[in-house]
Image: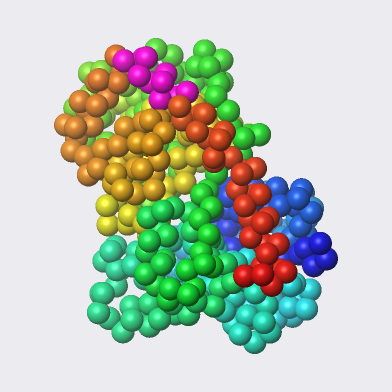
């Protein structure tokens, strides 16, 4: 196909292989293999990146990556984060303005939240269609975090901006059934046909089950005859992680290790709680290199996925698919009607505990630790479901179809 080319706008990208950075990098790699020419405009890495950042423009696996200059800091105060988002938006807009004739299509993510305005602007002015990948829905997340009042002027304006971005998109990709319901409510009925649900994924070439006795990550961490409960990823404000610390306190006499791998706004709070209780059955690790991802995920006997009830449908914990790829059962602190809650139940690949107490978590873990047959069945079911539905190959083909239709003007 001629014009099989697009520009991808996203804050995180290689070498920032965490959260959306990993997903966007993996997707771009696979779409490149399917014949797409991709240019990426992203910010300079700030989480877990290890690479030479002296060059603003690099090529990675056939993908041209340009890192734009920004001000502020996304890890600091609200004002600093706002400055970062505004400067990133401005830099991307200017760069795209200069290069706009090169791209017949735009792909844009909702990170940072106003980035979709770039797609709206260039679609309005130059009729360049854009595909919007909805990872988070704002301003609802900010309201539910208590950052904004639901009746404030900022909230009302932000809501209208979100509606503009959604309505102008040629394709709206949502990553969960719960999210799709919310997005549908923001669109008139005649635009519902633009919504397509493409779940997130894990790279089947990168993540696979690894027997515990062959697992290098367990060996490196000195984990032998201990039941490992692992949380890997961002420890953000939307993640209800505190109950697991309370459960660790109740289970201090059991042979269970609770491992937190990653970073985020809640990490320090969790560390302080563990120190306050003087817990020796909790381990905190930094983000691990991508080459150890498969061993790290497969090292766990049970992997934790969580999302506070207030954010159901506004976000989807996509780490679930890597866990399934590794053959690890899931302990989900999620609502039963959420995308991940439904998936865990449908695929019989774990246990759902909505709004759990420490006592409920402790009892569940005591039952599972002595029931290896149940864990083995969950592991096998999860991995089989992953291969059938949630691989990078499945996702890339779905995006390839949606992009081809958009570029051809069929949406």
| 180 displayed left or right of 369 | right
Location of the C terminus (image quadrant): bottom right
Count of residue discs: 0
Vertical order, 108 against 120 (above or below)? above
Vertical order, 376 against 151 (above or below)? above
Q: Residue at 56% x, 15% y: name it.
A: 214
Q: Residue at 39% x, 44% y: name it.
A: 340
Q: Residue at 40% x, 40% y: name it.
A: 343
Residue 233 visible in the shown view: yes
Q: Residue at 56% x, 35% y: name it.
A: 388
State yes or no: residue 350 in magenta.
no
Measuring from the top left, give residue 82's x and y in whole percent.
44, 73
Location of the N terminus (image quadrant): bottom right
Vertical order, 370 against 394 (above or below)? above
Q: Which residue is more in the foreground, 2 or 240?
A: 2
Measuring from the top left, give residue 213's x and y in whole percent.
52, 13
Kindly give the residue lying farthest to the right in the view shown.
2
Measuring from the top left, give residue 284's x and y in whole percent.
40, 35
State which quadrant residue 373 falls in: top left
Measuring from the top left, give residue 167's x and y in whole percent.
50, 76
Q: What kind of colouring is applied to the model shown?
A: rainbow
Residue 7 visible in the shown view: no
Query: What predominant SS class does the magenta segment belong to?
Result: helix
Residue range (magenta): 371-380
Q: Which residue is more in the foreground, 219 or 102?
A: 102
């Amino acid at each position: 196909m001629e014009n099989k080319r697009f520009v991808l706008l996203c804050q995180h990208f290689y070498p920032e292989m965490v959260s959306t950075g990993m997903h966007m990098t993996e997707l771009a790699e696979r779409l490149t293999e399917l014949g797409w020419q991709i240019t990426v405009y992203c910010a300079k890495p700030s989480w877990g990146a290890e690479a030479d950042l002296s060059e603003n423009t690099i090529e990675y696996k056939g993908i041209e990556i340009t890192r734009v200059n920004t001000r502020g800091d996304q890890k600091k105060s609200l004002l600093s984060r706002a400055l970062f988002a505004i400067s990133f938006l401005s830099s991307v807009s200017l760069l795209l303005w200069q290069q706009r004739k090169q791209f017949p299509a735009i792909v844009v993510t909702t990170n940072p939240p106003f980035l979709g305005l770039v797609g709206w602007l260039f679609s309005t002015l130059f009729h360049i269609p854009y595909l919007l990948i909805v990872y988070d829905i704002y301003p609802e997340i900010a309201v539910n975090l208590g950052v904004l009042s639901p009746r404030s002027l900022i909230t009302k304006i932000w809501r209208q901006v979100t509606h503009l971005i959604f309505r102008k998109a040629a394709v709206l990709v949502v990553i969960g059934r719960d999210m799709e319901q919310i997005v549908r409510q923001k669109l008139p009925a005649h635009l519902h046909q633009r919504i397509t649900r493409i779940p997130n994924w894990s790279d089947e070439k990168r993540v696979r089950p690894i027997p515990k006795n062959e697992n290098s990550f367990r060996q490196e961490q000195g984990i032998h005859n201990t039941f490992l409960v692992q949380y890997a990823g961002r420890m953000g404000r939307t993640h209800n992680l505190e109950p697991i610390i309370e459960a660790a306190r109740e289970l201090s006499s059991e042979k269970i290790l609770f491992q937190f791998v990653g970073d985020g706004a809640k990490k320090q709070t969790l560390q302080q709680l563990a120190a306050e209780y003087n817990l020796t059955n909790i381990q905190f690790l930094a983000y691990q290199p991508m080459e150890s991802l498969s061993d790290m995920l497969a090292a766990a006997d049970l992997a934790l996925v969580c999302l506070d009830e207030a954010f159901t449908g506004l976000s989807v914990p996509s780490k679930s698919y890597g866990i399934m790829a590794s053959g690890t059962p899931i302990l989900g602190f999620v609502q039963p009607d959420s995308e991940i809650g439904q998936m865990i139940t449908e695929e019989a690949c774990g246990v759902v505990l909505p709004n759990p107490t420490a006592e409920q978590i402790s009892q569940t873990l005591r039952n599972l630790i002595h029931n290896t047959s149940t864990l083995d069945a969950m592991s096998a079911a999860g991995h089989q479901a992953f291969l059938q539905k949630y691989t990078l190959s499945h996702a890339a083909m779905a995006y390839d179809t949606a992009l081809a239709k958009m570029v051809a003007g069929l949406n």
